[in-house]
Amino acid sequence: MAVEALYTKIEKTIQLSVGTIVLESSSGFPLNESNLYLIEQNGHIIWKAEKPDISTYFSRVKLNEDGNTFSAYTTHGHACELNLKDGKLISFTSFR
């Protein structure tokens, strides 16, 4: 499936049975939006990942082995675990 970026350029995609997880570049991305989201094949956004801090962006993403969660890191030093079903934060920690 060819995915088009919402605002900037796509840095990573992960294909799932329900759609594609998209990580867009944080450079030039609107601050109040999440640059990590799940999109269906028809272009409908299923969810936008919940950010641990409004002023940060996601910088890395990977699926976890359990098949129900994924991990993401932010530009402000957060390590996050999120629910694959709805993009909501399960937990996060800060590191420097």
Image (tube, grey):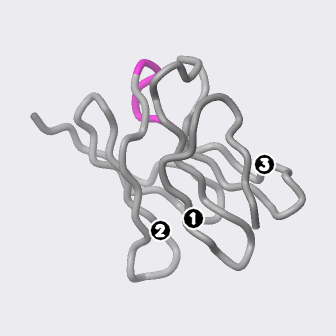
> Which amino acid, mark 1?
Leu
- Between 40 and 67, the residue placed more toward the observer is 40
The picture places residue 84, in percent across and down from the top left corner, at: 57, 64
Circle 1 or circle 3, nearest the eye: 3
- Numbered range of the magenta stretch: 50-55
Circle 3 or circle 2, nearest the eye: 3
Above or below, 35 relative to 14 = above
Earlier in the chain: of badge 1 and badge 3, it is 3
Label at residue 84: 1
Earlier in the chain: of badge 3 and badge 2, it is 3
Q: Residue at x 55, y 44 (%)?
A: 36
Above or below, 92 relative to 32 = below
Label at residue 69: 2
Q: Residue at x 76, y 67 (%)?
A: 1
Q: CA distance from mark 1 to mark 2?
A: 5 Å
Residue holding disc 3: 45
Mark 1 and mark 2 residues within 8 Å of each other at the beta carbon: yes
Which type of secondary structure does the marked residue at label 2 adopt? strand
> Which amino acid, mark 3?
Ile
> Which amino acid, mark 2?
Thr
The picture places residue 91, in percent across and down from the top left corner, at: 36, 51
